[in-house]
Amino acid sequence: MKKVVFLTFLMVVGLILPVQAELRIDVTEGIFKPIPIAITPFSGGGDAEMTKLAQDITSVIVSDLESCGLFKVVDPAAYIQSANDVMTNPRFADWRLLHAEALVGGLIRRQGSGFQVDFRLFDIFTESQLTGLSLNTEANNWRRVAHKIADEVYEKLTGDKGYFDTRIVYIHESGTEMKRKYRLAIMDQDGESHQFLSSGESIVHTPRFSPDRTKIAYMNFGKNNKEPNLHIFDLQTGQTSSLGAVHGLKLTPRFSPDGNTVILSIAEKGTTSLYTMDLATKQMTKMTTSSGAIDVSPCYSPDGRQIVYSSDRGGKPQLYVKNAGDPGEGARISFGAGLYHNPVWSPRGDLIAFTKQKGGVFSIGVIRPDGSGERLLDSGYLLEGPSWSPNGREIIYTHQASSRSKVALTCVDIVGFNKRKIKVPGEGSYPTW
Amino acid sequence: MRLKITSLLAVTALVTACGPCPEECVTATGQGALAEEIAEIAAESPCVPGSQADFVENVGDRVFFDFDRSTLRSEGMETIQRQAQWLAQYANYGVTIDGHTDNRGTVEYNLALGERRAHAAKEKLIAHGVSPERIRVISYGKNKPIIEQDGSEWAYQQNRVAITVLQ
């Protein structure tokens, strides 16, 4: 399903300039002022097709960097040099007058049946090149090239890995409340290259990527919505397979960090317990045993040693953390008023995102694995199902503003700023990133 | 062993044979309506003993719960007792209990809660003598509403149910 991308980083293009990364964004809390960056429209030389490609690539880079909220692109009308000139001889003193702090330029030329992009990123204050790369690919990969350049800029200026060359899987919803259609869908993180992965004949829920992002584990209600089971969709083959006929109602699958195990919940006889399934042997191991409890929504820590999950064994749903190595009950970490659901461990390991339900209001929040430092990032009529960006900097979730509103995908930075809707053709819920 | 109503003849015969029958069905059969129309009316009619409609109208297919609860209320227990009696009479039927919740919760927790409700109804049916082999349990959580949610308390109330469906 996924196109094989022939994309090579040819070389690091160097200018003879001192390399020092003075320009670094450090956002840890509070309101952040975006860093002004000048992105000169990439040049396609005299080639009309390359010029069009250069425009498209520039606009995706600009859109990526602006969407994350950390950058403000300086109005191109004020630019005092073309991309060609910036690539060879950037006039830093003049760019400083525009209050730009970083500067990007790029050239595109035909290369076989594809094209090559050379781009450079400069720190205007230190007058130094922060990075320079040459990328070579087929023409239909232009979006990914643009995202990779945006990732480079993001990484050099923030110190965090970029997340623009990534995809989001979610549940596409359509139809009225009474006749709702749920379809598994995938798209680029900016909503482009959208594809449906299921027909909508059966209800599908809770998709989750494998660590290498080649597979999606999800719940599928099957024929006539009467045969619920967990399925794995293989993005490389386009095939979907059932996780096997095990007793009970199987819910909330999630891959282990090594991709060899799926942890899930099975609801049976009024009790919902955690299980692991070895994907190679299909061997199941029961991980929690509280009779009558709902232990649900398990998620591994990034090192694979711990599991966070939601359990109502103390009366109401709260967050618990347990050892991933052996069966047994976890230790409660959430003690605030309200109900806690859908915990998801950050890829950085330092935070757990969750859904909180209190007094008819739903919130998305984060808490440290030891239960300290709870913070709510967004609240409203119905918010649920958080998922982390691969760099652990953003959280995407289901957002419904009122009972009559459409269900949307919303994204927010972990410090709670730059809340924005993610473009979806219709309605969407339960994103996984 | 699953009972299916296949004979139209039987349906038309039964329509006139039972209790409170709506005007339309009498008229329709009386006029010798087309077979499909009869079948359609029969499917909707509360008048066929042993049908899903009879079960829904005269026994009650829904058992309600309080918000975030899966404990049976007294009227629910009475409904289940009637269901068990009816199922004793029509022993060919298997049933599926569908667990549902209102939408004030997460997809994940509500799927588990729906199962717990459906299981509570199943246990009660078994206590009243229905064989466990005849009962299947499934949960749709909040994702298959049975009534449009308009934000009112009433609507939420209506959606906190386990529904017994004949097979």
Image (spheres, coloured by chain):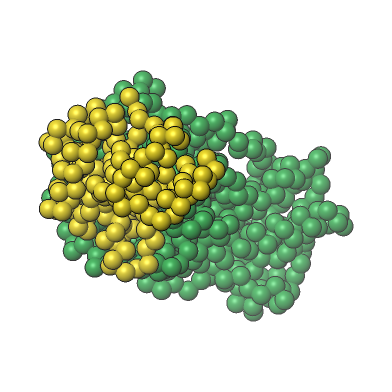
Q: Quadrant of residue A329?
A: top left
Number of numbered tags placed on the structure image: 0
**Vertical placement of A239 versus B161: above or below?**
above
Q: Which chain is green?
A: A
Q: Is A319 left, or right, of A417 in this rendering?
A: left
Residue lying furthest front? B30
Camera sees residue A143: yes
At horizontal 76% and vertical 55% (from top left) the residue drawn is: A53
At horizontal 51% and vertical 44% (from top left) the residue drawn is: B32
**Vertical placement of B149 versus A322: above or below?**
below
At horizontal 46% and vertical 46% (from top left) the residue drawn is: B29
Residue A83 % position (x, y): 74, 63
Q: Nearer the viewer, residue A70 or A285?
A: A285
Residue lying furthest bottom? A97
Camera sees residue A349: no
Q: Is A154 left, or right, of A15 in this rendering?
A: left
Drawing shade for chain B: yellow
At horizontal 26% and vertical 33% (from top left) the residue drawn is: B90
Q: Is A306 left, or right, of B81 in this rendering?
A: right
Query: If the image is split into quadrants, where does the N terminus of chain B sit?
Result: top left
Q: Nearer the viewer, residue A129 or B136?
A: B136
Query: If the image is split into quadrants, where does the C terminus of chain B sit?
Result: top left
